Amino acid sequence: QVRLVESGGGTVQAGGSLRLSCAASGYIAAMECIAWFRQTPGREREGVAAIYARRGTTDYADSLEGRFTISLDNAKNTAYLQMNSLKLEDTAMYYCAAAPSRWGACLTAPQSTYIYWGQGTQVTVSS
């Protein structure tokens, strides 16, 4: 069993940066995939970044244009999402999730693959 708790959200001006954290109660490195998703009201939840926990390979949504970086600190049992050059359209509730197994790529795997989810942290980008 893995419990995930996100933190680090808040309000930031466009062009600014935030770093989200996802602290795990279980051994996060035993997971196959760790990912960050985001959702805005009325829209489907979308994957923004994923990391293959055992080998460290990362994958990102094309729409991010290289602005976000996902990382994993196994010693702290914590995943991070560094978000730079934030845009108004990045405003969303951000969730981290963990999958103990996967079919295909972490970022594009069905969200049902991710059986552990955090409660979310709100990111608001203002003009």
Image: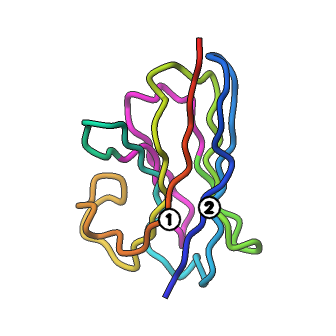
* Residue 68, percent from left and from top: 57, 36
* Residue 56, percent from left and from top: 57, 62
Residue in the image at 63% along x and 54% along y: 71
Quadrant in the rendering for residue 102:
bottom left
Q: Measured along the vertical axis of the image, is residue 71 above or below residue 9?
A: below
Helix, strand or loop at label 1? It is loop
Q: Measured along the vertical axis of the image, is residue 54 above or below residue 96?
A: below
Q: Residue furthest right?
A: 75
Q: For residue 49: magenta? A: yes
Measure the C-alpha gap from mark 1 to mark 2: 8 Å
Q: Residues within 10 Å of mark 1 (few under 14, many from 20)?
A: many
Q: Residue furthest top?
A: 127
Q: Residues within 10 Å of mark 2 (few under 14, many from 20)?
A: many
Q: How many marks?
A: 2
**Amino acid on which the number 2 mark rests in the picture:** Cys
Which residues make up the magenta segment?
47-69
Residue in the image at 59% along x and 18% along y: 126
Residue in the image at 25% along x and 43% along y: 44
User: Circle 1 sits on which residue?
Assistant: 118
Q: Residue furthest front?
A: 41
Q: How is the image coloured?
A: rainbow
User: Circle 2 sits on which residue?
Assistant: 22
**Amino acid on which the number 1 mark rests in the picture:** Gly
Which is in the foreground here, disc 1 or disc 2? 1
* Residue 127, percent from left and from top: 59, 11
Check contact, mark 1 vs mark 2: CB within 8 A: yes
Residue in the image at 28% along x and 52% along y: 108
Going from the N terminus, do you reach mark 1 or mark 2 first?
A: 2
Q: Nearer the viewer, residue 117 or 67?
A: 117
Helix, strand or loop at label 2? It is strand
Q: Measured along the vertical axis of the image, is residue 95 above or below residue 85?
A: below
- Image side of residue 52 versus residue 28, left or right: left
